[in-house]
Amino acid sequence: MLFVAGFQFIFNILDQLKPSKAEINWVVALMLGAVIGLLSGLTGTGGGIFLSPLIVFFGWTSIKEASGTASAFIFFNSLSGLMGNMASIQELPTTVLLFSCAALLGVIIGTQLGIKHLNVGGLKKVLGCVLILAGLKFIIT
């Protein structure tokens, strides 16, 4: 699924099938949310990697809005995971500060690239590469 979404963003293979801007169908959105949750749980990854391509493909948002939506989703998902970790083993991983700083630096760099340097086409290609890398990670590990 990640490879298909990644190649779609890079090469625009399915653009003729995608609506330009569509009304959100809440039943479909809730079902997709459940599927994203299931896939996230099965693969051990956050759901943001699945959320971004789906909401763009269904025409529910633009690529830039999807990046912001997925970022907020990932933040709250990560916060929930850390709180769950605290509740179950009463401590945080020792690397949490290092990873938090790295994530914050990535957010700052990504935001600057998205706002000032990349047009929508460039942003789609970057997201496509991220999705393909995530797919490769699943295969390799």
Image (cartoon, rainbow, N blue to C red):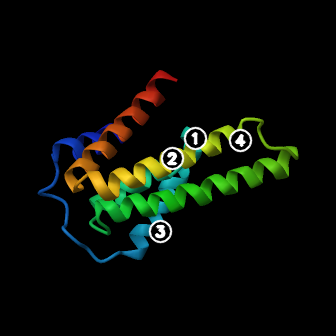
The disc label shown at residue 102, or none? 1
Tag shown at residue 39: 2
Q: Which numbered disc, 4 or 1, marks the residue that appears first in the sequence?
A: 4
Instruction: Give the foreground label among 4 and 2.
Output: 4
Specify which label sits upstream in the sequence, 4 or 2: 2
The local crowd at label 1, few if under 14, some if 14 to 19, many if 20 or more residues have their Cα within 10 Å, is: few
Q: Secondary structure at mark 3?
A: helix
Closer to the chain start, of discs 2 and 1, is 2
**Residue at horizontal 68%, vertical 57%?**
80
| Residue picked out by circle 4 | 96
Q: Nearer the viewer, residue 77 or 126?
A: 126
Disc 2 or 3, which lies upstream in sequence?
Answer: 3
Residue 60 horizontal/vertical position (percent): 32, 69
C-alpha distance separating marks 2 and 3? 14 Å
Q: Which residue is mark 3?
A: 30
Q: Amino acid at mark 1?
A: Ala
The answer to whether marks 2 and 3 mark residues whose Cβ atoms lie closer than 8 Å is no
**Residue contact at pointers 4 and 1, CB within 8 angstroms:** no
Q: Measure the alpha-carbon separation of dots 3 and 4.
A: 31 Å
User: Counting residues from the N terminus, which is met first, the one under dot 3 or under dot 1?
Assistant: 3
Residue at (88% x, 47% y) in the render = 90
Element type where label 4 sits in the image: helix
- The image quarter containing residue 68 is bottom left
